[in-house]
Amino acid sequence: MPRRTATMLASTLMLIALLCAGVFIPVPYAEMSPGPTVNTLGDHDGEPVLQIAGKKTYATSGHLNMTTVRVTSADYRMNLVEAVYGWLAHDNKVVPHETLYPDGKTEEQSTQENAEEFSQSQESAKVAALKQLDVPVKSWVIVSTVVKGSPAQGKLHAGDVIKAVDGTAVKEPNDVAKLVTKHKPGQDVRFTIVPAKEQAAAEKEKRTPTKTQDISMTTTTSDDTGEKRAIVGISAGTDHTFPFTIDIKLADVGGPSAGLMFALGIYDKLTPGSLTGGRFVAGTGTIDDAGKVGPIGGIEMKTVGARAKGAQYFLTPADNCAAAAKDTPDGLTLIKVGTIQDALGALKDIRSGDTADLPKCGK
C-alpha cells in the first residue's frame, strides 16, 4: 500500500475513532436553553393564568410575560459532541452538571425544591402587589419544613404557627434561627405554637386561633457552616391570609423567578387601565413580600426566549443587568429594576411613550 494512501486511511480511522468517542463518552455537563414564555395577563392551556374572585378586576391589554429556562434532566449525560455543539450554539449554554444539580441532587429532589420555591414566589407576588395597592394582608411565621431525624420531628409540623421562642415573640422567619442559636447545642429550647389544624380551622371559621401549645426540645449541633451552632431541624417561612381569592394557574413551571411578573399581572388586573399600554413587556426576577426584586439564573436564555416571542422590553433584575447586557437580542430593551416600584415606574414611561430616560442595563 502506498505511504500516502496508508496515511490517509490511518487518519480516517483515527477521525472515526474520535467521533465515536465523542458520541459515546459522557461528559459532566448539562445544557440550558430558552424555555416557554407565558403572558400572565392571558390564558394558558385554556384558562386564565391569574384568577381573582371576590374583588373587582379590570380589562388589560398587552403582555406581561414571565420567562423560563429549559434544562437537561439530572439523569441525562451529554456526550462530547453535544457539549461542543452547545458551546458553539448562540442560544444555548453548557454548564457543569453540578451547577444545576448540586451535591448529587436527583431530578425528583430538584423538581420538588423548584415546586416549593414556585409556590412561595406566588405568595410573595400576591403580598407585594396588594401592598402596592394598600390592601391589608395578614401574615404570620410558620414551620415550613421539618428535617427527618431532627429534634423537631414529631414535635413540630409543617404549617404550625410559631408565636414565640423561649417567650420572645417571633415576627419574621429569621427571628426563629436567631433565637435558637442563642443556645448551645444540647440545651433545651421552648416553642410556643398554634398547631396547623387549629390555624386552618380558625381561618375557615374566620376567627382568631385560641389554642396554643408550649413545646420543648433539645437542640443538636450543626456544623454545615464550619461553626458548631444549635439547631432543631426546621426551616421557618411565612403564611398569609388574603382578603379575596387570587389563584395562579400555571403547571409545569418551577423556581422563584416569575415572582415579579406575577406581582405586576395581579396589580394590572386590580387597577383600571393597562400597565403596558398594549406593549409587549417580558421580564424575570424573584420578589419578596416587601417588593424587592432579586436575581435569577439563565438570564441570557430568558432574553432570547422573550425576544423570539416578540417582546420589546425586558424587566431585568439589577444584579443580572451586567450579564444580560453582554449579548442583548436585537430589538429588545433591557430595563434595570430593583423593586416592584421601579418596574411600575418603567411601565408608566413605556405606556406613555416617554422611554428616553428608562433605566436601561448597560448604561
Image (tube, rainbow, N blue to C red):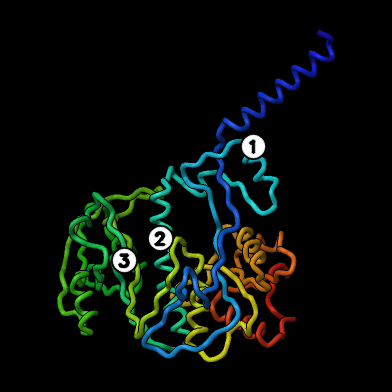
Q: Is residue 363 left or right of residue 168?
A: right
Type of amino acid at the residue the image marks with label 3: Val
Q: Are the residues tagged 1 and 2 within 8 Å (C-beta)? A: no
Mark 1 lies on a secondary structure that is: helix
Task: Tell me the mark number nearer the camera, choosing from 3 and 1.
Answer: 1
Measured along the vertical axis of the image, is residue 273 above or below residue 40? below
The picture places residue 14, in percent across and down from the top left corner, at 70, 21
Mark 3 lies on a secondary structure that is: helix
Type of amino acid at the residue the image marks with label 1: Val
Which comes before the other along the chain, label 1 or label 2? 1
Q: Is residue 118 left or right of residue 285?
A: left
Task: Tell me the mark number nearer the camera, choosing from 1 and 2.
Answer: 1
Circle 1 packing at 10 Å, graded few (<14), some (14-19), many (20+), is: some
Residue located farthest toward the top when viewing the structure as drawn: 1
C-alpha span from label 3 to label 1 = 50 Å
Which residue bears the numbered disc 1?
Answer: 81
Which residue bears the numbered disc 2?
Answer: 115
Q: Quadrant of the N terminus?
A: top right
Circle 3 packing at 10 Å, graded few (<14), some (14-19), many (20+), is: many
Which residue bears the numbered disc 3?
Answer: 176
Q: Is residue 114 left or right of residue 17?
A: left
The picture places residue 304, in percent across and down from the top left corner, at 65, 61
Residue 316: image quadrant is bottom right
212 or 43: nearer the eye?
43
Residue at 33% over, 61% down? 235
Residue 68: image quadrant is bottom right
